[in-house]
Amino acid sequence: MDERLYGIGQMSALFISILVSLYFLSQTGISTNSFMTINSFPLFEKMLSLNFFMFVLLTAISIALVLVIGKKYPFKYSLIFSLSGYGIGTILGIVIFKIPAFFLLVIVGAISIPIGIRFLNEREKEVKYLKEERSGASAAGRILIIITAGFFLMLVFYGATNQEQLKNDFVPEFLKMSVGDGVTLDDYFQMQLVSTIMTSESQLVDSIYSSAEMKNLKIKNDPDAIALSKKLLDINKSLGSEETKEAALVQIKDKKIDFGQEIISQLPMISTMSTYAWIIYAISGLLTFSIIASVIVKNIAAVIYTIIMSAFPIVHTLGVKTEENKKQ
């Protein structure tokens, strides 16, 4: 069979794996905005989903297929097959699944492919043992480093063009951070305020009930004093009930107290962080992306590349003139 057909088949497999990976990415709901916030819990929840796992797996498969093409064909033909499959798959995926925020990565990925293929062949000449495993991991890592750098620049560009909005959203998003059991920081501060008010009022009632004047009136068996004493006990009991706390919490929420401004006035560091939120988010996104890429995707891609090369070890010679052909 014409070896170009093998190349087209591998190009098609790369195209399909990229397209399906972008489908699963779209299903996770992860976008650029997911990284541009102080509240990272929603992002981490999405990363723990089956859709994200499938996206990571298919991304690793795509990188492995690029390396397989790079190994099996001369450089010129490997670029044609890999860049065609990559370009068609990413552009169609981004358009069909409406994830335009990652469009800038198309160019970065296209740049990383020839570099990764070149590095694969060079690295394979250097290593003495486990050539495919080690060269595959190194080449996949090189591709991912370039893509990670592009992703970081994308976040920096997005943050730089939205600095004011990110600064204004910093404190509200900070207050939305969860402290467990679905309770946000804002809820926690409000509950603490209610608890403080209830405790203060309870102490006031206790001081009145325990006062010398109140004791003297009770000793005299004054009916009004006895009634007041009972009333104070009922009030104190009520102040410790959950119903009273919940009612007070509703009143606090209705007043719409700006806890964000209160926090800023007490913690100037938060105000400073909000000013540089755009670059903080970009660095945080870089660290998250780097860990996933270097620890998970790179190693999975290396394993898949090794398995494919072990199962199909024949190196194609498309476009290469053999000695026999030269004699003819």
Image (tube, rainbow, N blue to C red):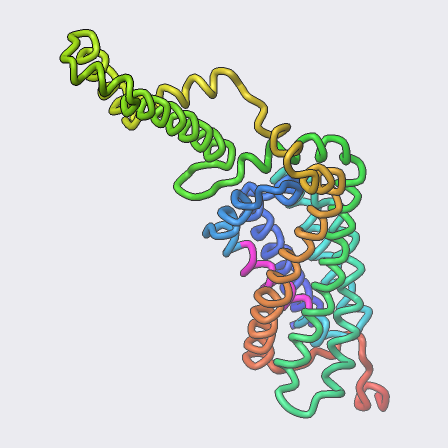
Residue 168, picture quadrant: top right
Looking at the image, residue 242 lies above or below residue 180: above
Q: Write the start and end of the magenta stretch as one range.
A: 55-66
Depth order, front residue of 326/10: 10
The answer to which of 89 and 228 lies nearer the viewer is 228
Is residue 151 depicted above or below 202 in this figure? below
Using the rendered image of the protein, determine whether residue 95 is visible from the camera's viewpoint.
no
Q: Residue at x 73, y 76 (%)?
A: 120
What is the count of numbered marks? 0
Residue 193 vs 158, above or below: the answer is above
Q: Quadrant of the C terminus?
A: bottom right
Examine the rendering and report whether any part of residue 6 can be seen.
yes
Indicate the position of residue 148 as horizontal and vertical percent values. Answer: 72, 58
Left or right? Give the position of 222 relative to 313. Answer: left
For image coordinates 55% across by 77% down, the residue present is 307
Of residues 311 and 192, the one nearer the viewer is 192
**From the viewer's perspective, is 318 left or right of 8?**
right
Rendered location of residue 13, percent (x, y): 60, 60
Q: Position of residue 44 (x, y in %)?
A: 53, 49
Q: Is residue 62 magenta?
A: yes
Image quadrant where residue 205 sits: top left
Q: Residue at x 75, y 69 (%)?
A: 116
Nearest the camera: 71 or 138? Answer: 138
Residue 37 lies, in percent from the top left, at 63, 41
